[in-house]
Image (tube, rainbow, N blue to C red):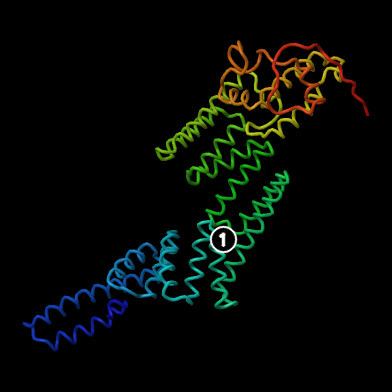
């Protein structure tokens, strides 16, 4: 029983008494002798574990606690010291497992709530972390460790939310500033840092700050390769028109993923290959100045602004020829990207128009002036266009000032 409770020193003394009281030839003597040896081994391992623990030699502490705990069934103090040692070796899941066992038997173990909260926080699981801190504070509202942990999580959560709100409002620079502020609450929390860094990459991309987006994504990958990091880096490279680099990154992602998901990465490789091909031809996304994943509302807005800007009736001076070319390209780009079927072909690298000969423009499409009138006077936009070369130029009168 003493060994089962982790009191192996006392167990050794008890077995010595039993051995002394029994005859050397009796069956009990052999049994007590074997049990004494096990208790001595257990006591030695506990002593070594506690010495390593006191000296903050965490790897050795984990090693000896593992050995000692193999002899016992219930020893909360040893289990908690192992949990602390696991935490310091960055085995946060191990610490969570051990503290979970403790809390299952001892619901009021404040230090276990604190350590479990800290382990979840280190994994970036902030909601689970704050839940454990709250449980601890219910037992002792002034518990120093749980108060500090709760304050940290709330600070990071608040700053992260401010960043998300700014991002959704299109204030990308503000979002980036808030997210860096969240990271700086504790620069040592690598998983929180990595999670927020991916948000920063996305914001830089949205702000068309492609060099910064790629730099931050590379930092994420260089720290440790992951599916999320490689995807973010490839996406940033694709948005920054670094197509060859994006192909390499997505290829690496393909190697990184399990067999059943390699197709996802392969589709991204193909997307980058198509973008590379289109970059050497007529790039409709670039013409309209929108991202490749732009929605129909963004595409329509870009078309309307550019078509008004470059309409030949507004450009009758020296740039008349340039304006007519731009106006035609803008109409062609919108015709394709606003049509689901045509956009799908374009995104797959297929010829969009018949007899196109190489993809990316130069085919048979709607007269740009007729198309302009359809969009501005018939509420058009978004699929179902009647393609055909008919219709002459129609003039629109613009008001100035």
Q: Residue at x 44, y 38 (%)?
A: 261
Using the image, determine if residue 190 lies above or below residue 315: below
Total numbered circles: 1
Q: Position of residue 301 (x, y in %)?
A: 75, 32
Q: Position of residue 280 (x, y in %)?
A: 60, 19
Q: Residue at x 61, y 42 (%)?
A: 201
Instruction: Determine the image quadrant of residue 31.
Output: bottom left
Q: Is 13 situated left or right of 82 in this image?
A: left
Q: Nearer the viewer, residue 217 or 296?
A: 296
Q: Residue at x 55, y 28 (%)?
A: 272
Considering the numbered disc 1 on the image, is that residue within a helix, a strand or a loop?
A: helix
Q: Nearer the viewer, residue 167 or 353?
A: 353
Q: Nearer the viewer, residue 31 or 347?
A: 347
Q: Position of residue 44 (x, y in %)?
A: 27, 73
**What crowding class fits label 1: few (fewer than 14 Cα within 10 Å), some (14-19), or many (20 or more)?**
some
**Residue at mark 1:** 127
Outermost residue on the right side: it is 401
Instruction: Determine the image quadrant of residue 399.
Output: top right
> Which part of the image, by quadrant, shows the C terminus?
top right
Q: Is 214 situated left or right of 96 in this image?
A: right
Q: Is 350 situated left or right of 320 in this image?
A: left
Using the image, determine if residue 208 lies above or below residue 19: above
Instruction: Determine the image quadrant of residue 1.
Output: bottom left
Outermost residue on the left side: it is 25
Q: Position of residue 56 (x, y in %)?
A: 41, 67
Q: Nearer the viewer, residue 300 or 17?
A: 300
Q: Residue at x 62, y 66 (%)?
A: 151
Using the image, determine if residue 363 lies above or below residue 256: above
């Amino acid at each position: 029983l003493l060994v089962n409770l982790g009191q192996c020193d006392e167990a050794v003394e008890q077995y010595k008494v039993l051995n002394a009281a029994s005859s050397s030839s009796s069956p009990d003597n052999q049994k007590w002798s074997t049990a004494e040896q096990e208790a001595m081994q257990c006591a030695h391992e506990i002593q070594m574990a506690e010495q390593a623990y006191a000296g903050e030699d965490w790897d050795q502490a984990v090693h000896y606690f593992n050995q000692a705990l193999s002899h016992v069934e219930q020893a909360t103090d040893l289990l908690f010291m192992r949990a602390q040692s696991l935490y310091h070796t960055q085995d946060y899941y191990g610490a969570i497992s051990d503290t979970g066992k403790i809390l299952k038997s001892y619901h009021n173990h404040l230090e276990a709530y604190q350590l479990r909260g800290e382990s979840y926080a280190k994994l970036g699981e902030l909601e689970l972390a704050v839940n454990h801190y709250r449980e601890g504070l219910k037992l002792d509202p002034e518990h120093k460790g749980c108060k500090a942990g709760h304050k940290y999580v709330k600070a990071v959560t608040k700053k992260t939310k401010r960043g998300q709100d700014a991002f959704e409002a299109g204030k990308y620079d503000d979002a980036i500033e808030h997210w860096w502020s969240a990271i700086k609450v504790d620069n040592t929390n690598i998983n929180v840092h990595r999670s927020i860094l991916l948000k920063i990459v996305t914001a830089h991309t949205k702000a068309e700050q492609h060099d910064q987006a790629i730099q931050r994504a590379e930092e994420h990958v260089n720290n440790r390769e992951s599916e999320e990091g490689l995807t973010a880096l490839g996406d940033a490279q694709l948005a920054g028109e670094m197509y060859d680099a994006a192909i390499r990154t997505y290829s690496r992602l393909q190697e990184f993923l399990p067999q059943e998901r390699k197709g996802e990465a392969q589709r991204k490789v193909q997307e980058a290959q198509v973008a590379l091909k289109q970059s050497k031809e007529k790039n409709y996304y670039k013409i309209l100045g929108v991202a490749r994943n732009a929605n129909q509302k963004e595409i329509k807005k870009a078309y309307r602004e550019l078509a008004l800007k470059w309409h030949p009736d507004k450009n009758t001076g020296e740039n008349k020829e340039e304006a007519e070319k731009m106006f035609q390209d803008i109409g062609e780009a919108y015709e394709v990207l606003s049509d689901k079927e045509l956009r799908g072909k374009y995104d797959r690298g297929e010829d969009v128009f018949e007899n196109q000969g190489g993809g990316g423009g130069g085919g048979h499409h709607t007269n740009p002036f007729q198309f302009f009138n359809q969009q501005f006077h018939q509420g058009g936009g978004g699929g179902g266009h009647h393609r055909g070369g008919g219709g002459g130029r129609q003039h629109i009168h613009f008001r100035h000032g």
